[in-house]
Image (cartoon, rainbow, N blue to C red):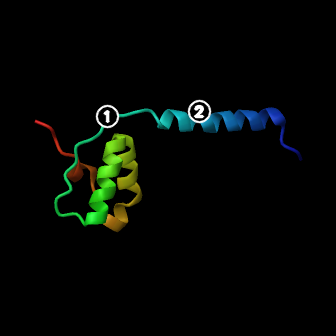
């Protein structure tokens, strides 16, 4: 069974739309990297500069390796 050309176009468009929405510019997030390994702190700062979504994804993906938690990383600005 050959895939329908319309179906392929629709799926491709849906994938690119999701990617475009995920790349919206977000403001940087202030983070606390005290006590982290240098390579982990650098990556956390890099992702925080990209915004909250990028930081949240990084923390979620690496949670078992680095034992990170968003509540302990994000610094509240006063």
Residue 11 is situated, as x and y percent measured from the top left of the image, at: 70, 37
Determine which quarter of the picture holds residue 35: bottom left
Determine which quarter of the picture holds residue 42: bottom left
Residue 7 is situated, as x and y percent measured from the top left of the image, at: 77, 35
Residue 34 is situated, as x and y percent measured from the top left of the image, at: 16, 59
User: Is residue 26 shown left or right of residue 2?
Assistant: left
User: Is residue 67 among what the camera can see?
Assistant: no
Q: Tell me the crowding category of disc 2: few under 14, some 14 to 19, or many 20 or more residues within 10 angstroms, Cα based.
A: few
Q: Mark 2 points at which residue?
A: 17
User: Does residue 4 sit above or below 40 in this rendering?
Assistant: above
Residue 55 is situated, as x and y percent measured from the top left of the image, at: 35, 48
Q: In which quarter of the image is the C terminus?
A: top left
User: Does residue 1 sit above or below 66 in this rendering?
Assistant: above
User: Is residue 43 among what the camera can see?
Assistant: yes
Task: Name the element at disc 1.
Answer: loop
Q: Residue at x 26, y 65 (%)?
A: 38
Q: Mark 1 points at which residue?
A: 27
Task: Name the element at disc 2.
Answer: helix
């Amino acid at each position: 069974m050959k895939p329908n050309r319309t179906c392929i176009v629709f799926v491709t468009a849906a994938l690119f739309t999701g990617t475009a929405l995920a790349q919206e510019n977000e403001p940087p997030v202030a983070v606390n990297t005290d006590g982290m390994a240098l390579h982990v702190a650098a990556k956390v700062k890099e992702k925080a500069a990209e915004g909250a979504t990028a930081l949240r994804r990084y923390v979620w993906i690496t949670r078992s390796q680095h034992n990170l938690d968003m509540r302990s990383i994000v610094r509240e600005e006063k």
